[in-house]
Amino acid sequence: MSDWKYWLGTIVLAAVFGTMNVSAAETVYLIDVRTPQEFAQGHLAGAINIEHQEIADKIGSVTTDKNAHIELYCRSGNRSGVALRRLREAGYQNAINLGGFEELRKTRPTAQ
């Protein structure tokens, strides 16, 4: 997917579903912290896959902005909770845990 389509989709998702109160100029990073195998079976549209145990080490490849708006999810919300704690320990204070994929897919577009 081209970068502009990803960013546009991310902004539209944030505006439509109201998960983050951000301006159109701000980016929301949607991160699926499940395994690559789970991600390949289906994920939210626009999501980036970084496993929960690698989030602190790999978030810098997505953003180094400690004020970035980051949304995390996994299968049930447990791993995204662990990832959220690790991001907060690394100084990322605007991250949130969206919970589980099965529930989220009922209200958000998915990709395969």
Image (tube, rainbow, N blue to C red):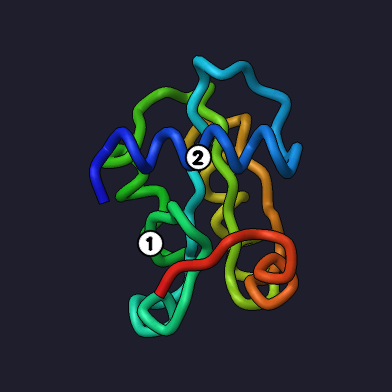
SS for tag 1? strand
Q: Report which quarter residue 19 is drawn in.
A: top right
Question: Looking at the image, is 108 positioned above or below residue 58?
Answer: below
Q: Three-letter amino acid code at disc 1? A: Asn
Task: Depth check: give the residue in front, 86 or 39.
Answer: 39
How far apart are the alpha carbons under marks 2 and 1?
A: 15 Å
For the point 68% across and 53% down, which residue is it? 97
Task: Depth check: give the residue in front, 88 or 45.
Answer: 45
The image shows residue 49 at horizontal and vertical percentages of 38, 62
The image shows residue 61 at horizontal and vertical percentages of 26, 41
Give the residue number, with chain letter if any, for mark 2. 10
Along the polypeptide, which appears first: circle 2 or circle 1? 2
Question: Looking at the image, is 73 positioned above or below residue 112?
Answer: above
- Which quadrant holds the C terminus? bottom left
Dot 1, how many residues are within 10 Å of its Cα: few (below 14), some (14-19), or many (20+)?
Answer: many
Pointer 2 with pointer 1, Cβ within 8 A: no
Give the residue number, with chain letter if any, for mark 1. 49
For the point 48% across and 64% down, which residue is it? 33
Dot 2, how many residues are within 10 Å of its Cα: few (below 14), some (14-19), or many (20+)?
Answer: many
The image shows residue 81 at horizontal and vertical percentages of 66, 60
For the point 54% across and 56% down, which residue is it? 83
Q: For the residues carrying marks 2 and 1, which lies nearer the camera in this image? A: 2
Q: Three-letter amino acid code at disc 2? A: Thr
Q: Report which quarter residue 54 is drawn in.
A: bottom left
